[in-house]
Image (cartoon, rainbow, N blue to C red):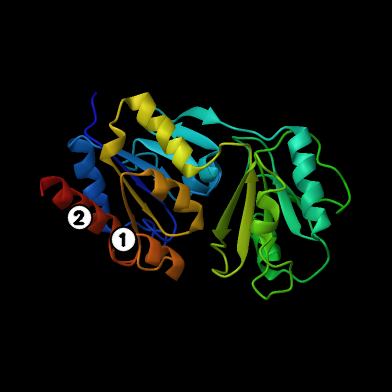
Amino acid sequence: QKFRGMVVSDLDGTLLRRDRSVSPEDLRTLMELGSDPVLRVIATGRSLYSARAVLADGFPIDYLIFSSGAGIVDWRSKTLVKAHALSADEVGRAMSALRALSADFMVHRPIPDNHYFLFYHSGRANPDFARRCEIYRDFASPARYEDDYPGDACEVLAVEPSDGSSAAGLHDLLAKPLSPLAVIRATSPIDGASTWVEIFPAGVSKGRAAEWIVRAEGVDPHEVLALGNDYNDVDLLDWAAVRFVVANAPEALRARYPSVGHYEASALTEAVNAWRRGKKS
């Protein structure tokens, strides 16, 4: 099947509303895109396990990019088509850099079991870090701060508190020293204020995953719309031919990209309608 284009949307804070539902308007838009036919993709920071908790098997998309691009599932067949992993040496390198900054971090198992993790706590107050460990208590295990991680991993995730108690700009302090590993900044979806810094293998990002799908499906890259809400969408937004952020995105992103409405108000439908108008003009 030849697709006429591709629409890629972030999930939490973009397509998924506060109550974890998708608006009837946005569901209808996704169904219409499938009939057009336009390829429909969700690109989320959630793990596959976490994404499946909020997306029914019949949810109207064609691909799921999860863990910020570390994995891709063909949603039509529920087939894992792409998975990246950090080597044991890369994990050790990331952990050493984080320990040098007294950062709190988690090391996640390889895909598809990357909802399991060991957590390494420096001992200082970090409510968002503690809350994430509590939310995933069935999958989270404590480790001594100085201990190594046994083997490969999907990612290393550090949580920088919002109270200014940690080293300023953890992402900026890590990006160059850990190159060529991917160091991705995101706002915590738990407290909406702390910063998560995710360390992945080189080349992992939502944008690179979307580019892989474009090539695999033979979609014209000039016919791609992307919709996001946070810093971990920047790579995707910069790559897409047409891009929007939602009204609840950070001010810095709203100054950088065109914006549509709030994620509680069918922002995907608004973005798709604007994209269609632009194609007709």
For image coordinates 46% across by 36% down, the residue present is 209
Q: Quadrant of residue 70?
A: top right
| Mark 1 touches mark 2? (CB < 8 Å) | yes
Give how far across and how far down residue 133 sits, in percent: 69, 58
Q: Quadrant of the N terminus?
A: top left
The residue at which mark 2 appears reads as 274
Quick one: label 2, few (<14), some, or many (20+) residues within 10 Å? some
Vertical order, 122 against 43 (above or below): below
Horizontal side, residue 207 vs residue 41: left or right: right
Q: Residue at x 20, y 55 (%)?
A: 274
**Residue drawn 52% across and 49% down?**
45
Dot 1 falls on a residue whose secondary structure is: loop
SS for tag 2? helix
- The three-letter code of the residue at mark 1 reads Pro
Instruction: Decide: is 275 above or below 133.
Output: above
**Residue at 41 percent of width and 51 percent of height:** 10
Crowding near the residue tagged with mark 1, few <14, some 14–19, many ≥20 C-alpha atoms within 10 Å: some
Q: Is residue 78 left or right of residue 141?
A: left
Q: Which residue is mark 1?
A: 258
Q: Position of residue 101 (x, y in %)?
A: 79, 59
User: Is residue 72 left or right of 142 when viewed as pictured?
Assistant: left
Q: In the image, which is nearer the foreground, mark 1 or mark 2?
A: 1
Residue 224 placement (x, y as % from top left)? 30, 41
Task: Tell me if 180 is positioned left or right of 270 in this view.
Answer: right
